[in-house]
Image (tube, helix red, strand yellow):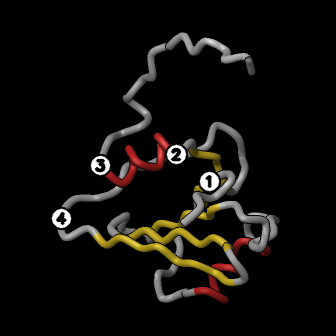
Amino acid sequence: MRPPITLWLCTQPTDMRCSYDGLAALVRRQLGQNPLSGHGFIFINRRRTQLKCLYFQAGGYCVWSKRLERGRFATLSSSTAGQAITLSPAEFEALIEGLDLVVTKRRKRWHPKVSAA
């Protein structure tokens, strides 16, 4: 499984009865994006207990979902008036694991550039 290129989190609550076609329509209509782009599109329900990620890979749509038995996913909102915000793979993992990304602050790290020998 190849990971999506970019992860987009929809900031509006989503009806979790939607599946492949319904989520793809939301990507087009609400986010103004192309669901066939290879990007991952993350949707959370109003109660923040269910999450779905739609992405296109190898000739077909994939939907990954998680339903929490207890607790809620963290509330993330964009600083702009947009319908979606981008997440890094680490931020997506933190969201899935229950970390609050608004309170959490990533410390700067040095990453040396590796030159081809």
Along the line of sight, the residue nearer the viewer: 33 or 58: 58
- First along the sequence among labels 3 and 1: 1
Q: Nearer the viewer, mark 2 or mark 4?
A: 2
Name the element at disc 2: helix
Say what amino acid the circle numbered 4 marks. Answer: Arg
| Rendered residue at 72%/71% (across/down) | 27
Residue holding disc 3: 98
| Rendered residue at 47%/66% (across/down) | 44
Q: Which mark is residue 7?
A: 1
> Distance of mark 3 from mark 1, alpha carbons?
17 Å
Say what amino acid the circle numbered 2 marks. Answer: Pro
Tell me, yes or no, whether the two marked residues, 3 and 1, touch with CB atoms within 8 Å. Answer: no
Q: Nearer the viewer, mark 1 or mark 4?
A: 1
Where residue 105 sits in the image (x, y, percent)? 42, 23
Where residue 108 sits in the image (x, y, percent)? 51, 13
Other residues around mark 3 within 10 Å, as few (<14) / some (14–19) / many (≥20):
some
| Rendered residue at 53%/77% (across/down) | 63
Where residue 87 sits in the image (x, y, percent)? 57, 45
Say what amino acid the circle numbered 1 marks. Answer: Leu
Residue holding disc 4: 70
Q: Quadrant of the N terminus?
A: bottom right
Residue holding disc 2: 89
Tell me, yes or no, whether the two marked residues, 1 and 4, touch with CB atoms within 8 Å. Answer: no
